[in-house]
Amino acid sequence: MNFLNFFWFFVLFLQTNAWRTFHMGRMSGGNLGAPACVNCSVKSTLVKTNWFPQLLDHFNPRNNTTWMQRYYVNDEYYEAGGPIFIMIGGEGEASDKWMTEGSWIDYAKKFRALLFQVEHRYYGKSHPTGDLSIKNLIYLSSEQALADLANFISTISNEYKLTGKWIAFGGSYSGSLAAWLRMKYPHLVHGAMSASGPLLAEVDFFDYFRIVDESLETYSEDCLTTVKNANVQLNLLTKEQLGRKKLDEAFRLCDPLESLMNEQKHMSNFWDTLANNFAGVVQYNKDNRIDQTAAGKITIDDVCGIMVNQSLGTPVDRLAAVSNLLLDANNETCLDYNYDKMIEEMRNITWNDDGVSFSLFHKKTLKFLSFLSLFRHFCDVYLNHFH
Ligand SMILES: *[C@@H]1O[C@H](CO)[C@@H](O)[C@H](O)[C@H]1NC(C)=O
Ligand SMILES: *[C@@H]1O[C@H](CO)[C@@H](O)[C@H](O)[C@H]1NC(C)=O
Ligand SMILES: *[C@@H]1O[C@H](CO)[C@@H](O)[C@H](O)[C@H]1NC(C)=O
Ligand SMILES: *[C@@H]1O[C@H](CO)[C@@H](O)[C@H](O)[C@H]1NC(C)=O
Ligand SMILES: *[C@@H]1O[C@H](CO)[C@@H](O)[C@H](O)[C@H]1NC(C)=O
Ligand SMILES: *[C@@H]1O[C@H](CO)[C@@H](O)[C@H](O)[C@H]1NC(C)=O
């Protein structure tokens, strides 16, 4: 497996409640929220949406099949000869709001830059293939996405006789792409702004949960200690029938534990879901996006406020209260930890503009599921149920 492909797996596990909304470090619908936007409707007139005929397979010279890749342009601030800024789309639908908001707009005004944003293949409306069947996912890789950008830059430069320098921008996964683009195509890209771009693939990425723990501790030491105690209690309760009944109810489980407890895959999913409630909240704590969902508004203060509130019962009751808070915020009536159902939903091969990134990201990662077995950090706080 090569390095760039492996990148898709960079943050494993975690989620906010059920795997439907946050799983393995990814938010359904993509991770980059839209920025706060003043006078959006006026500003949107500055942004044009275009479609670029893109090669399906950059690495097969015997096949010239193309598809249409969506991109946005804003030339409001541009003066001939100025630099060209390209914002790289990540694992979610591209938002035209970025074309008039964010600090890169300040730089564009200052440097008289021309602005592009290119949507990542397989996300949003950029559909390279007829459907999402496994055979079609072979063209979903970071190498192909980087080659898309290189092709885009050289074609657009020629077409519009642009002489300015290209500067790439991106955050998180697309921040990695920005850095890799500069590294791999230095003749096309003069510089790159890589925000929070994870560049090295990590096996057994325990640092991730170390940060989650430390973040909970910023609220109070008691918060983390109570999470840990709750998991110890939870573990004991799963071991006897009355305890399992109590958990079915307290955690509003879709399937009673009695019916799934004998299969490790379901139980790992159960423990994974509960641990990732905290990871999801920490990862997106107060991130200031405007399209904030009810779940997205839940903060470390909220979940720790529950964990340390003794009037809400024992630690495991409070853990259930956190889980239920997230279930409610996501309009989920029960907590679904059935692994087979999860896989079934991910097998859906129909394009879906909003949610596509979610199932896709996972399809891409399913290839590497064997690596999951290596991610067994949680042990201390979340116990060791992840296989
Ligand atoms: C928003 O638009 C109004 C009316 O055009 C204008 O007065 C105001 O300054 C704008 N606000 C910003 C932050 O651009
Ligand atoms: C692919 O396109 C290139 C450039 O237009 C052309 O030279 C080549 O013959 C085409 N190859 C095939 C297999 O169609
Ligand atoms: C090119 O690849 C596409 C997608 O895999 C395939 O449908 C098509 O038949 C190929 N064309 C040629 C000329 O091999
Ligand atoms: C603790 O929970 C109880 C019951 O929901 C609530 O009335 C109380 O305000 C909470 N205490 C704090 C400090 O949040
Ligand atoms: C939950 O339902 C409410 C009310 O119907 C809706 O406004 C909200 O968008 C839903 N949230 C999610 C995450 O689906
Ligand atoms: C598959 O996904 C599409 C698009 O989101 C959706 O309309 C359809 O109901 C899904 N099919 C199944 C069987 O869940």
Image: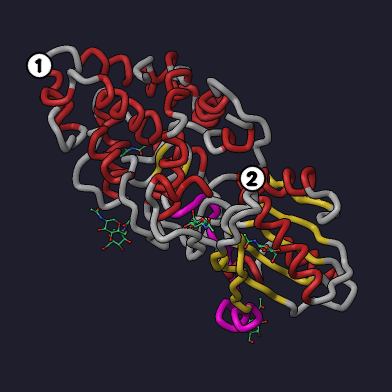
**Between residues 127 and 12, which one lies in front from this camera angle?**
127
**Which residues are the magenta region?**
29-47
Residue 219 visible here: no
Q: Is residue 210 left or right of residue 331?
A: right
Q: Residues within 10 Å of mark 1 (few under 14, many from 20)?
A: few
Residue 371 picture location, percent across and down:
47, 23
Identified at 28% across, 46% down, the residue is 345
Quarter of the image containing the N terminus?
A: top right
Q: What type of secondary structure mainly makes up the magenta span?
A: loop
Occupied quadrant, residue 316:
top left
Q: Which residue is mark 2?
A: 143
Residue 42 in the magenta stretch? The answer is yes
* Element carrying mark 2: helix
At label 1, which amino acid type do we have? Gln
At label 2, which amino acid type do we have? Glu
Identify the disc placed on residue 241.
1
Identify the disc placed on residue 226.
none
Image quadrant, ligand 4: top left
